[in-house]
Image (spheres, helix red, strand yellow):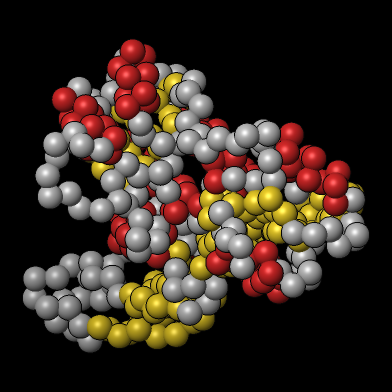
Amino acid sequence: MKVRDIANILEETAPLSYQESYDNAGLIIGSPDQEVTGILIALDVTEAVLEEAIKKGANRIVTHHPIIFSPFKKLTGKTYVERCIIKAIKHDLAIYAAHTNLDAVEGGVNSKICEKIGLQKVRTLSPASNQLSKLVTFVPLAEAQKVRTALFDAGAGQIGNYDSCSFNSEGSGTFRGGAQTNPFSGKPGEFHTENEIKIETIVPKPRMSKVISSLLQAHPYEEVAYDIYSLENEFEKAGSGMIGELPNPMNEIDFLHLLKKTFGCDAIRHTAFRNKPIQNIAICGGSGSFLINKAMAANADIFVSAEFKYNHFFDAENRMMLADIGHFESEQFTKEVFYEILTKKIPKFALHLTELNLNPVKYLV
């Protein structure tokens, strides 16, 4: 098992194209061709985490937060980041991060938070845009089902909770092959008309390469005609934050105590009680203040996230509650997300969850 194999497994769930422009997800330190002896999963990279990996015989570290965000002009060991980089290189430790790309997908960070709270009817709070394309191709009638199946198996045709979605229309295709061709039908040098099916289907952009490869393998023609159109449709399978419902409403203080217990919070910063039941809950792991208006527009009773500034507590305007449970607290279960993704593909591989509490924020209570 090589470093690139682990990366491919993680990116099947959290494609790198979903990361924000400021982010640095992916393989940060190490060679893609390095053999992996074991994997340590953590939220952050620290010197203690590197020592833990060395002791456990794990030469691959998978984290949520990237150790490197900005370029370096020198590596002198002056900061903990520089020391981590030097130590990782010295001990051949490969470091991989899945950050905002893992935030943005179903089954990622926010899905795990919803699971921990017990939310139902979960959906993306702010669906991604410009992440979908329409693929159009033209296939002989008798081969259409084979090609459709190949496209769907590769990840095309997913709309909401429906799969195998396509639109099909019959028409006539024309072509004339050159002297060196071996056409599926007709003869080289002769004008030919073929009854064809026009297949149109939706493809998430990160899946397009795999879908096109499958199309070329399944299609009977030597030269496959296809068109790709970029779409502005929202993609509900990816985006920022999530919103869902509790099975039964709770009063505000009981729900805050549920959060406190579930996420091990020493304290929760929140807006004033509205004296209304809590059932519709918006969440965002990490810093989620940019979604306050989205949460209000979705009629959330409370928005659970972290790192709200002073003015954000005014921005809710008593239309919903805000609950700041802490950055680490909101993302701590990301380790479980990584573990579940990897064990599905490599159940017998040496996977370790860090035993360290890496929360740098302390409270005097």
Task: Work out which quarter of the rendered image holds the N terminus and state it.
Answer: top left
Q: Position of residue 134 (x, y in %)?
A: 44, 74
Tell me: 47 left or right of 289: left
Name above or below for residue 141 compared with residue 27.
below
Task: Work out which quarter of the rendered image holds the C terminus and state it.
Answer: top right
> Residue sitting at 23 percent across and 70 percent down?
223
Tell me: 228 left or right of 166: left
**Quadrant assignment, res 364:** top right
In the image, farthest residue toward the front:
364
**Quadrant assignment, res 56:** top left
Name above or below for residue 295 compared with residue 167.
above
Tell me: 340 left or right of 194: right
Q: Nearer the viewer, residue 348 or 335?
A: 335
Tell me: 32 left or right of 96: left
Q: Is residue 42 visible?
A: yes
> Residue sitting at 14 percent across and 39 percent down?
75
Q: Nearer the viewer, residue 269 or 240?
A: 269
Q: Position of residue 155 (x, y in %)?
A: 46, 56
**Quadrant assignment, res 254:** top right
Q: Position of residue 292 (x, y in %)?
A: 64, 67
